[in-house]
Amino acid sequence: MGNTKNHVWESLDAGEQVRRFQEMFASSPSFSALLQGPDHRFVLTNPAYQQLIGHREVIGLPVREAVPEVQHQGFFELLDNVYASGEAFVGKDMEITLQRSAGGPTETRYLDFVYQPIKDQAGNVAAIFVEGVDITDRHVSEAALRTSEARLRELNADLERQVIQRAQARGLTWKLSPDLLGALNAKGYFETANPAWESVLGWTEEEVLSMSIFELLHPDDLEHTRAGFELTQIGQPALRFANRYRCKNGDHRWISWIGIPEDGYVYCTGRDITAERTAEAELAAARDALRQSHKMEAIGQLTGGIAHDFNNLLTGIIGSLDIVRRRMAAGRLDEIPRFMAAATNAAQRAGALTHRLLAFARRQSLDTRPNDINRLVANMEDLLHRTLGEHIELKCTLAPDLWTAFTDTNQFENAVLNLAINARDAMLDGGHLTIETANARLDAAYAAEQDEVAPGDYVVIVVSDTGSGMPADVMAKAIDPFFTTKPAGQGTGLGLSMVYGFAKQTGGHLRIYSEVGQGTTVKLYLPRALQDAVVLEKPAEDVPRGQGETILIVEDDATVRLILADVLEELGYHVLLATDARPAIPILQSDRRIDLMVSDVMLPHINGRKLAEIARASRPGLKVLFVTGYAESATVRSDFLDPGMDMMTKPFALDDLGAKVRAMIER
């Protein structure tokens, strides 16, 4: 279009010129526009021109108003010169800045174009025809090519120098390297060996080349080295492959190898890591010794605490029974109830102590079920008020939309009570205790920073006091068993350790925040339950009696067996006895009537759970009550018990046993 003769246009009127332009514009792949008048108003633009300037509405607008972003680049002045002089302008590889979307960023484009004046019959310029091509992609490619060519010339210029320098460096590296270097052939012999072989292992180059690598290896490393060597023969590199090589003096040193297979050889470099391996072994031994020391320290603290508390309790039991025997011999029966009560109280405290120890060790038998935590806390308020005393104000803030939580009701109540007692003892001059409940979501980032915490939904119980708080060194030991800051005889040191063990065993979490003089906050997280809360019925106060039903008792402890039999016979049941599974199985497989089996979990030969499976093979509907002092497999009852089974943890009150037996038989 730049070579169109002016006299062609002179023979056409303006309407015909517009019609011709419209036809050409519609089909032209070049961008084109017709500008009219001294202010260069847009008359026509083709689709290519609209694409170039971003499809803005420009018809009827002066060019300076339509595309203002190019005004500083001289393009408007070029148009003015063409209009004034009547001479065409040809631009090659011209850089222009355009804003191709409203409010968007400007971008640089490169154009080849022509400004062609269109004259009227009098010879005056009436319009300017603009035509061109967007060469931005070609411009960028050519610039990149020029940069690449320049870089290639630079690399070529350095190539000869690099070859010379590397050849020199290779020779020096071979001689001076402290690492073992060499080329290993397919038969397992080194065909080259650098001087480091002699300085590290004592073997000369000739000696290295005369021996297979398998002659130099420590016997314990032969098998895995042979396997690694075979992998290199199928093209797999060896990276940080460690084994022991024999020195000339008979010692062995650890060598870490990198072997790269190429052209039938494995090119090897081996670094002496004997010092590192020795240091690692010494560090591992020191860590093991430290762990063992900490373990023995913990065991010493634990056994010392157990011995102290149990000896006190046993003294109370044995002493009370001795006095009862003396009073009975002297006929002074009126004083017997007081000492019997003392012995019972000491025995119950011993049972509570074992439960706390099992809770700390996460081995107590838990009856976890969906629970309404708000209901449990509300039911404890009267007990907590009595425990705290009048000098401490209790406030319970319970979330109205609280989720249900998986927990053991009794152990949860014990945990809250322990936290309240700890708070009370930290507020000797009075203060405030706040118990709050809330829903909480622990994300993966938080869980990764904590001890054995799974991300997910939890119900959190927050117990906060305004007491004395704990310094950092006390905080570090707060959950250790038998650690206490209370005076002798005023605390076992098992409160927080029990709460911590209970939280972990239920799949929950415990966090303690404390500052000296500012008080302490304990957060107990319990896993969310998606089911509705299960409310258990309270047992009747009067112990229900039997109606002649038959109960099989399987218990290896003679005293416990005697007591169980006596109380159940007294309640009106017919009792069969077995010391373990062996005499029990024939009874179970007989035709004798058995309404309930009461069995210890930990029995010799065959445990109680396995015995129940054997019993149900011949008596599918047999009900089973397990009684246990401790059984690791029974720590989570829902995993241990099948329908028709239940469990009681020793020690238990005999009235509770009678109520449980009656409930199971009638169930």
Image: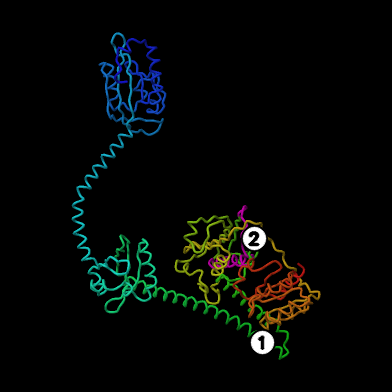
| Left or right: 83 as drawn, with respect to 44 | left
**Which residue position holds label 2?**
371
Relative to 129, residue 490 above or below: below
| Label 1 secondary element | helix
Q: Amino acid at mark 2?
A: Asn
| Label 2 secondary element | strand
Q: Which is more N-terminal, label 1 or label 2?
A: 1
Q: Position of residue 286 (x, y in %)?
A: 39, 75
- Say which of marks 2 and 1 sits in front: 2
Relative to 23, residue 625 above or below: below
Placement of the N terminus among the 4 image quadrants: top left
- Magenta segment: 399-427
Image point 29% across, 24% down: which residue? 75
| Left or right: 289 as drawn, with respect to 612 | left
**Which residue position holds label 1?**
323
Q: Position of residue 545 (x, y in %)?
A: 79, 74
Relative to 557, residue 454 above or below: above
Give the residue furthest to the right. Answer: 547
Q: Position of residue 656 (x, y in %)?
A: 71, 72
